[in-house]
Structures are given as structure tokens and as C-alpha cells.
Amino acid sequence: MPIEFSKGLSARATPIPGLIILDLPVHGDARGWFKENWQREKMAAAGIELPDFGPVQNNISFNDAVGTTRGIHAEPWDKYVSVATGRIFGAWVDLREGDTFGAVFTAELDPSTAIFVPRGVGNSYQTLEPDTAYTYLVNDHWSPDATYTFLNLADETAAIDWPIPLENVEISAKDLQHPRLADVVPMPPKKILVTGANGQLGRALREEFGEHPWIEYASRAELDLTSPDLDAARRWRDYATIINAAAYTKVDAAETTEGRVQAWAANVTAVAALARVAGRNGITLVHVSSDYVFDGTADGAYPEGAALSPLGVYGQTKAAGDVVVSTLPRHYIVRTSWVIGEGNNFVRTMASLAERGIDPRVVDDQVGRLSFTSDIAAAIRALIDGEAPFGVYNVTGQGEPVTWFDVARTVFELTGHDPGRVTGVSTAEYFAGATGPVAPRPLNSVLDAAAAQAVGLPLADAGVRLREYLERA
């Protein structure tokens, strides 16, 4: 069968999600033919939405005889398959967990066609011409520790209509022994790793994502992000996303000699190590940032693209971490403020003071919005599941900005106590008698959530969330 030379560069969807067949321009004359087998820039210009999957290996399969048939193998990596010479019949079966498990697609490939095969989709090829060679780019190296899934070529459920009957072709004994579809263990999705799993946000992320084999929650004791062995701590190619909820958050202690070292280690050195792992392995890194990366002097809310201008050591380390993460092609920086979750926090402290009859002095010149960890976790999941554009997203509670003094009075009122017991003071007055180092605070912590709202992140009213939080306490 002659090669088709008249095609333009285009792509066609298949019944299997992510499995995309491509038509490639082939240029021929009396000398032979030439094609650009993988041309990322032209594919993007043509509107072909293939992931920039970062191949690390190029393999070639050469087959002498017509009918050589290779088994239905699903590997834990993506591959781009094309024909160098000859012609093949391809069969693909979705062996991933999900609604399309068992879906089948078949097609013939010659040098003018190629196909992108996503991780977990079983693929098999039967040669239709002698001296056929096909090539595939893959974005991982074979490993004995990786997870592989197989399907029998003769499975009755898939019912593949092989051009050359299987009893008449060359097949390896191993391929003949693979299981039927009913006995196949589906390929699990790539993993999600949550660091800082024991913190306020880490606990909320565990509640949001739940317990699944493909989700890991790690505390510092379980995964030291500053270890020189971090690259070998996991088979990182099995991970799709790292959510970094680990951080040093002792704002005042960060101003001490010891605290400064600890803050830089946790908020910069560890983040840089995660960024290195993510970059090398095509992992999306979700990094949680802070309003402390700004000096609080802005007139109005800080947009996502506002220039960083931290005041103290804690803010400086968070800003440095943001810069490191922003260099990755696949990243979400989730910037938040005034975080409230399970554990010790300002709201619980005020509720306890109210109950114990203590009348607090609370600063009334710092303005912002409360952000509840359950909402931050939900927003992070929405970013990942919705495959939102990578970049910075401000994620805070919504509603009118308030002061810490306003929050304290509201807590007193909602818990049945007299809000008049709370006295407002300036930040300078509040810390006037401090005996240890005090970090400078941004007076304006209001963040503009326009980008988050544009992609439909679930942002709740902070006042409503405060009431619900106290009702559960």
C-alpha cells in the first residue's frame, strides 16, 4: 500500500480519552520520502493538544515477517508511536481505572500516521508488511519496580478483529499467557503526594482527598525534604502532583538566629529540592504561599501579579520559595492569608478567652480576610482536577475585609459573650512590651481573588465560614 503524501498535519480523537491519532505530512520524490515525525511547535500551532510529555528514550521495533504480533501491554508512561517503514495494525485497550476501562480502538498506521498513547492504555501491534519498523518515544525508563498491566490478545470482551488470525502469526509464549479482561488489575492513576500532612492544611487536604492507594500523606518524619537522598526517596515518575503543605510558620521566632536558619531550611531549601524533583519528573508542584510576601502598604487588594516586597524573615523565605516554584513549567502557587483550621489558631484562642472570662486586647490596624483550610484544600483540588492554567492564585475567604479586632468581637458575639469585652489597639501598642523579637506585620493582607474566580474555584464568604466553624467547635 503506497504512502499517502497529501495529508496536512492534524489530529483525531478516539473513544479512549487521551489516545490521539495524528496525520503527518510526508514529502516524497524519486529519492524517497521525508517527514517531521514529532514537531512540537507545529503541532501546537495546528491546535493539536498533546501533552508536552518530555520523552527520555527513543525505541525502535523491527519485524522481519508479516503477522508478527506483540502483546497488549500497558506501561506506566506515555508513548508516541509512529512507523518508520512498512505498515502495522494497532489495537489499544484502556486498562486504566475509570469509566472507560475496557474501551477498544484499532487502526492501521503507516509512515503518514502516528499515535499518542497515554499512560495505562494497553497497546499492541501486528505487522502487515515485511521488514516493518516502528518507533516510539517514551517519557520514562523501564524499571523492575514500575507497575505494568497486560491483556490477552484473544480476550473475548475486547474482541479485537485482527487482520491476520492469531493462530497464524508469531506471538511470544509470554503474551499468550496474559489474563482476560475480567482478571486484569487496572492501572491506578499517578500518585498525589501531600507534604506537611500533620499540619492544619495537611489535615484538611486529607479530609478533602480521602484515603486512596494513589494518595500519600507524609510528615517531616516520614519524608525529609532537606535530605540529600530526596531524589531516591520515591519512584518519582509514578507521581502526578506534589502538594507542599509543609512550612515553617513561626513568624516571630523566624527573627531569631536559630529560627532564621529553620525558616530558610523549610521554606526555601526544601521547596527548592521539591522543585528539582518536580522539574526532572514532569510533576505538578502545588505550593502554598502567604500574604506575608507583601509589605502591606498597597492601596487596595493585592493582585496575583503584584511585586513581592516582604518585610520580615518569614515573609522573605516565603517569597523566595514562590520565586523558586515559579520557574517550573507545571506549578500552582496558592497564596492565602489568615489561615484557620483544626488545631491552635486565633479563632480558637478568642473563643477560649471569652469562655474563661479574659478580656483581650486585639490589633485593629491590620486588615484582611480569614481563610479556612477546608476551603483552601477544596480550591487546590479544583485547580488539579480542573487542570486550570498554571500560575498564581489568591485563595482566601470572601466578603468585606475586616481587622483582627473585628474577628475577635465576632467570635465573642457568636459564642454568646459580650463583644465589648474586646479592646482594639494598634500593632505598635500591642507589641510595645514584647521581650523577644517581633516580626513586622503587613497592615494590608487583602488579596484579590480574580484569577481564582475566573477558573471557578469554590471561594466561600469568610463570615459564613466563621459561623460554621464555631458551630462545629
Image: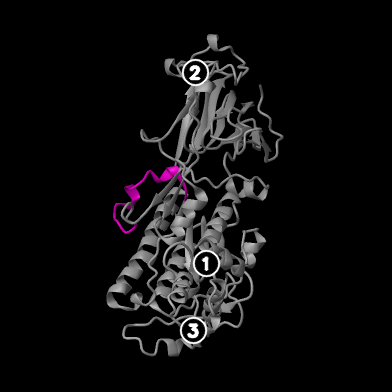
In magenta segment, residue 229:
yes
* Kind of residue indicated by mark 1: Arg
Residue 279, image x and y in percent?
Answer: 44, 53
Cβ atoms at labels 2 and 3 below 8 Å apart: no
- Who's the residue at 67% across and 37% down the image? 13
Residue count near mark 2 (Cα–Cα under 10 Å), binned few <14, some 14–19, many ≥20: few
Classify residue 472 as left or right of residue 27: left
- Who's the residue at 34% across and 78% down the image? 255
Residue range (magenta):
225-241
- Who's the residue at 58% across and 24% down the image? 86
Colour scheme employed for the rendering of this structure: one colour
Residue matched to label 3 = 363
Q: Nearer the viewer, residue 334 or 55?
A: 334
Q: Secondary structure at mark 1?
A: strand
Q: What quarter of the picture does the N terminus occupy?
A: top right
Asked if 380 appears above or below 395 in the picture, the reply is: above
* Kind of residue indicated by mark 3: Val
Nearest to the eye among marks 2 and 3: give it.
3
Gap between marks 1 and 2 measured at Cα: 58 Å
* Kind of residue indicated by mark 2: Asp
Residue matched to label 2 = 64
Residue matched to label 1 = 335
Q: Nearer the viewer, residue 168 or 159?
A: 159
Asked if 26 appears above or below 211 in the picture, the reply is: above
In this rendering, does residue 37 appear at all?
Answer: yes
